[in-house]
Image (cartoon, rainbow, N blue to C red):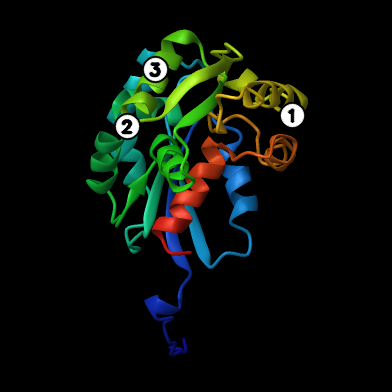
């Protein structure tokens, strides 16, 4: 046997490590992130978290017990610039601070964010205080989400929902339905911008079309989370 010498890549020569915790039932966030981060000087590491097929306050709250275990599956050899927890409605129920505490207890993360926290940051960055909110959720999930926005100083008086509890169906709501609903809500004179909630809602292709139609800021759970992670990581 020949022992062959080798050299190591310095940490500062590696792409910026980013972590992402994705719901087991989510079919949308991961592929949209791979498209959105293409070409960026970042390496995205993904872990999954157990989640129910239906979205209810009970199933969302139950995920809190698994956040640390999911974060623990991210590579221990890395210090993550940011770890994103990929569930908007669960972040409203569990609380962004509690989510961050669980993530940081199990992996080396300098920052933690989630779609709710990211959407609030995005709205503030663009000077928005009145949002049109498009949701796929049932009312028992919509209420704590809208309350979280209100506590952050963002009104969602212009509001509409697809009223769907099943994750698999949310992931299959077509772009035409999303476009029509967002444009209808966003056309309200009381809406300064439009937020499309839920990481499982397919928004990557349709967001530019809605923006062009409305001439207002339009963002989704996935686009806000991506924007906030890049911003926190200085990417």
Image quadrant where residue 177 sits: top right
Q: Are marks 2 and 1 in contact (CB under 8 Å)?
A: no
Badge number at residue 59: 3
Residue closer to the observer: 20 or 192:
192
Q: In this picture, is 80 found above or below 154?
A: below
Horizontal side of residue 235 vs 104, given as left or right: right
Q: Crowding near pointer 2: few (<14 within 10 Å), some, many (20+)?
A: some
| Label 3 SS | helix
Q: How many marks?
A: 3
| Label 2 SS | helix
Q: In this picture, is 84 found above or below 157?
A: below
* Inter-mark Cα distance, 2 to 1: 32 Å
> Which residue is depicted at the point 36% across and 40% down?
70
Residue under label 1 = 175
Q: In this picture, is 102 found above or below 198?
A: below
Q: Crowding near pointer 1: few (<14 within 10 Å), some, many (20+)?
A: some
Label 2 or label 3, whichever comes before in sequence order: 3
Label 2 or label 1, whichever comes before in sequence order: 2
Residue under label 2 = 66
Q: Is residue 101 visible?
A: yes
Residue 64 drawn at (x, y percent): 30, 28
* Inter-mark Cα distance, 1 to 3: 27 Å
> Which residue is depicted at the point 50% across and 61% down?
43
> Which residue is depicted at the point 29% across and 51% down?
107
Image quadrant where residue 169 sits: top right
Q: Nearer the viewer, mark 2 or mark 1?
A: 1
Q: Nearer the viewer, mark 2 or mark 3?
A: 3
Label 1 or label 3, whichever comes before in sequence order: 3
Residue found at the far right of this picture: 176
Residue found at the far front of this picture: 189
Q: In this picture, is 108 found above or below 39?
A: above
């Amino acid at each position: 046997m020949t022992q062959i010498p080798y050299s190591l890549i310095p940490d500062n020569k590696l792409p910026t490590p980013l972590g992402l915790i994705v719901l087991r039932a989510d079919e949308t966030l991961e592929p949209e992130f791979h498209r959105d981060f293409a070409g960026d000087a970042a390496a995205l590491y993904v872990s999954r978290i157990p989640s129910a097929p239906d979205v209810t306050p009970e199933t969302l709250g139950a995920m809190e017990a698994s956040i640390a275990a999911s974060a623990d599956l991210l590579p221990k050899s890395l210090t993550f610039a940011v770890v994103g927890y990929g569930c908007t409605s669960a972040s409203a129920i569990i609380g962004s601070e509690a989510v961050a505490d669980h993530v940081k207890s199990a992996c080396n993360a300098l920052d933690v964010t989630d779609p709710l926290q990211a959407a609030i940051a995005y709205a503030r960055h663009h000077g928005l205080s009145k949002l049109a909110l498009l949701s796929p959720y049932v009312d028992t999930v919509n209420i704590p989400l809208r309350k979280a926005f209100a506590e952050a100083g963002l009104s969602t008086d212009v509001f509409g929902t697809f009223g769907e509890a099943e994750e698999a169906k949310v992931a299959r709501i077509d772009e035409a339905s999303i476009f029509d609903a967002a444009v209808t809500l966003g056309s309200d004179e009381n809406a300064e911008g439009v937020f499309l909630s839920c990481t499982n809602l397919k928004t990557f292709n349709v967001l530019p079309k809605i923006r062009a139609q409305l001439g207002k800021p339009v963002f989704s759970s996935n686009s806000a989370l991506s924007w906030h992670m890049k911003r926190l990581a200085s990417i």
